[in-house]
Each structure stands twice: as structure tokens, then as C-alpha cells.
Image: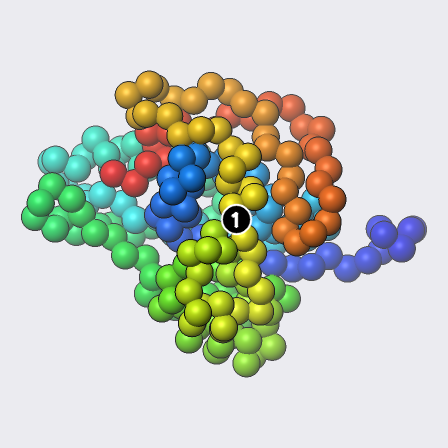
């Protein structure tokens, strides 16, 4: 067995605020290639392994005006589950103006502490630029866990930057994805996975996998 084959693989736990990641992609006028995001967060191209948990806010249940949106969102959740992601959902509440709110921050904080205790990862990656996670990051680091924040670097504030072990800039990854299409144009076509983007400064290598189906854009959007 070679040294490379016998080397231990880094165990990574990535927690994703779906609406925050979607907003980051929208700010660059890009759609999301979720399989490439998963590869990037787990550093799979360089031997990393672990789980990606996606936290998704759902349109309210049992409210007629949101049922079509909810059905689309649930199809997207099903796509994530069948492509290797763990998914945690939270039902939203109407705000009275035709919109809804489904804040997953507290859910992410509670589950982060529980999952770290159970799975004992070497590294936790939080996909968010919300400064409210700064205290959680410090708490986990005091317990010996490396915590990285994955976001567009320019959107990360001082509190979050000062608490994290490292910032993973998502911009180089996101700008390689398809340009954002209008939801009225229909779902995006089949496309090959985006070649891996290095998490730090390693040279990129291309995947040799075949084409995969990405979820329709209309089912990625937080409506």
C-alpha cells in the first residue's frame, strides 16, 4: 500500500444555509452547481470526506398561496437527498405581505454542537456570512475543532473573520457556474460538473465523470 493510499483522510462536516448560499450566487448572477459545491466543501479532490448538511427554509404548510412554491422546494429537497446531501428543513411562517420567513440560524447552531459531539470531525465548514455565528465558531474552536467559514470573502465582516480558523472564498467557485437564468426560461439544460476549484492554492484538476442532472433553477430559488 502506498503512502498516499494509507494516509488518513480529513473528516469534514459542512453546514450550509441554503438561502445564504443562494444569495451569494445571485449576487454574482450565477446559478448553483450543488455537486461542485459539495466537492469543494469536502475537499474531495484532495482526499477529504464527510457530510454536507443543507438547511432549507420551506414555504408555509397549509397556506394556499404558498403551496405551489412549497411543492417546488420539496422537489429540490428530494434532489439534494438523492445526490448525497443530508437535508434539514424548517417550515416558514407568513409575514403578511405575500412573503414568508424561515430562519434556520438557530437550528444550525444547535445541530452544529450536537453533530460535532457525535461525529468528531477535524474540520467544520459553515456556509454563511452571518456574524451571529461568531460565538458558535469560537465555542467549537475552544473544543479543538478547526472551523472554516465559506462565503464570498468581501461579504465576511470583522466579527466572523476574527472568529474563524480560515475563510474559504466562494467567489472563484461560483463565477465558474452557469449564468443565472430567468425562472420563466425553464430549467437549465444538462451540464457537465464544474471542474473542481481548489479550496486554498492547490492547482485545479478536472473531473472525468460523465454528465449529471442539476436541479431546475426554479426549484433552487427561495421564493
Q: Which residue appears farthest toward the right when viewing the image? A: 1
Residue 46 percent across, percent down from the top left: 72, 49
Q: Which residue is mark 1?
A: 170
Q: For the residue labelled by badge 1, is the local secondary structure a helix, a strand or a loop?
A: loop
Residue 202 percent across, percent down from the top left: 73, 49
Q: Is residue 103 above or below residue 206?
A: below
Residue 71 visible (yes or no): yes
Instruction: Tell me: 67 left or right of 214.
Output: left
Q: Residue at x 55, y 67 (%)?
A: 147
Instruction: Tell me: 9 left or right of 23.
Output: right
Q: Is residue 221 above or below residue 141?
A: above
Residue 22 visible (yes or no): no
Residue 60 percent across, percent down from the top left: 19, 45
> In which quadrant of the rendered view does residue 182 lie?
top left
Residue situated in front as seen by the camera: 177 or 154:
154
Q: Quadrant of the C terminus?
A: top left
Q: Is residue 116 above or below residue 127?
A: below
Q: Residue at x 77, y 59 (%)?
A: 8
> In which quadrant of the rendered view does residue 180 lie?
top left
Residue 100 percent across, percent down from the top left: 18, 47
Q: Residue at x 25, y 52 (%)?
A: 102
Q: Which residue appears farthest toward the left when viewing the image? A: 96
Residue situated in front as seen by the camera: 140 or 22:
22
Amino acid at each position: 500500500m502506498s503512502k498516499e493510499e494509507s494516509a488518513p483522510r480529513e473528516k469534514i462536516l459542512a453546514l450550509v444555509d441554503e438561502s445564504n448560499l443562494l444569495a451569494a450566487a445571485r449576487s454574482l448572477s450565477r446559478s448553483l452547481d450543488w455537486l461542485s459545491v459539495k466537492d469543494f466543501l469536502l475537499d474531495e479532490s484532495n482526499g477529504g470526506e464527510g457530510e454536507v448538511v443543507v438547511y432549507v427554509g420551506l414555504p408555509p404548510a397549509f397556506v394556499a398561496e404558498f403551496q405551489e412554491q412549497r411543492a417546488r422546494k420539496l422537489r429540490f429537497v428530494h434532489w439534494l437527498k438523492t445526490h448525497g446531501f443530508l437535508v434539514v428543513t424548517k417550515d416558514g411562517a407568513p409575514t403578511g405581505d405575500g412573503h414568508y420567513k424561515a430562519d434556520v440560524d438557530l437550528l444550525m447552531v444547535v445541530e452544529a454542537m450536537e453533530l460535532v459531539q457525535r461525529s468528531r470531525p477535524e474540520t467544520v465548514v459553515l456556509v454563511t456570512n452571518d456574524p451571529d455565528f461568531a460565538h458558535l465558531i469560537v465555542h467549537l474552536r475552544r473544543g479543538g475543532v478547526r472551523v472554516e467559514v465559506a462565503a464570498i470573502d468581501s461579504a465576511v465582516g470583522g466579527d466572523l473573520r476574527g472568529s474563524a480558523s480560515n475563510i474559504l472564498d466562494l467567489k472563484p467557485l461560483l463565477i465558474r457556474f452557469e449564468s443565472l437564468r430567468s425562472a420563466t426560461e425553464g430549467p437549465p439544460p444538462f451540464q457537465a460538473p464544474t471542474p473542481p476549484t481548489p479550496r486554498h492554492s492547490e492547482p485545479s484538476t478536472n473531473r472525468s465523470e460523465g454528465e449529471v442532472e442539476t436541479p431546475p433553477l426554479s426549484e433552487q430559488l427561495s421564493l
